[in-house]
Image: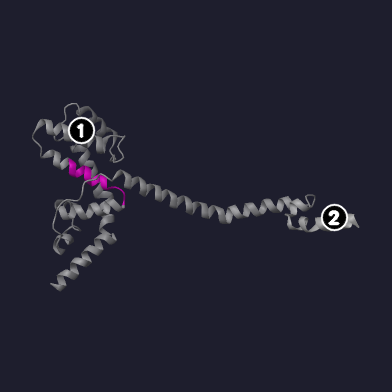
Amino acid sequence: MGSEWMEMRKRPVCAAQEPTACAPGQPGVENQGSNACCFCWCCCCSCSCLTVRNQEEQRLRRTSYEARTEDLPTCEESPGPTLEEASAWAQSFDKLMLTPAGRNAFREFLRTEFSEENMLFWMACEELKKEANKATIEEKARIIYEDYISILSPKEVSLDSRVRETINRSMAEPSRNIFDDAQLQIYTLMHRDSYPRFMNSALYKDLLRSLSEKAVEA
């Protein structure tokens, strides 16, 4: 009687366990477990892992960009653009870059693409060209180099090796035109890559729509 009672006590415990634990000798149990895991990885886990990884990469990219742009200068002071002025931006990139309002709108778009430093570098080069004092030129050139040319800078712009080497050699005695080739290269990059996307962006289209509504109301 005592042995039968003990046997009954054991049965529920064994029944609650996994099949592999209760009957390790059953054929095919281990293979079934392996196939289930493989199926889960192929059809479920891989998709969810990719989604999580992409979200994490986007979060890290956004955090990195926010960290490296904390000290960026504010936008240029400028009155809002008129409908005529904003419409002219679609005619050429030069017209967009000609006015502070155009540069501000384009800079806002570049910020969404994490490439605002291209505009800031171009603007800094324009300011350098206005300087006449040798000491001021040297100081501003050093700051521009450290901010946008140095490979150690988080705001480094994309330049080819030839332009970089020319700048490096000239930094011993910088002139106000030391970054001319680099500035042209970045201007061309913005014109070719970013400007077409800006023209088709919701930001630009919403601006035109808002200006059109104001013109009708007036």
User: In the rendered image, is residue 187 in sight?
Assistant: no
Q: Is residue 120 part of the magenta span, yes or no?
A: yes
Residue 75: x %, y % from top left: 19, 51
Residue at mark 2? 6
* Residue in the picture at 10% in, 31% down: 134
Residue at mark 1? 142
Report the side of 26 relative to 32 (left or right). Answer: right
Q: Is residue 200 above or below residue 180?
A: below
Amino acid type of the residue tagged 2 in the rendering = Met
Looking at the image, which is closer to me, 72 or 85? 72
Looking at the image, which is closer to me, 101 or 178? 101
Q: Where the C terminus falls, by quadrant?
A: bottom left
Looking at the image, which is closer to me, 27 or 159? 27
Give the mark count. Answer: 2
Report the side of 149 relative to 29 (left or right). Answer: left
The earlier-in-sequence mark between 2 and 1 is 2
Q: Residue furthest right?
A: 1
Residue interval drawn in magenta: 113-124
User: In the rendered image, is residue 129 in sight?
Assistant: yes
What main secondary structure does the magenta stretch of the protein show? helix
Residue 152 got which mark? none
Q: Is residue 118 part of the magenta span, yes or no?
A: yes
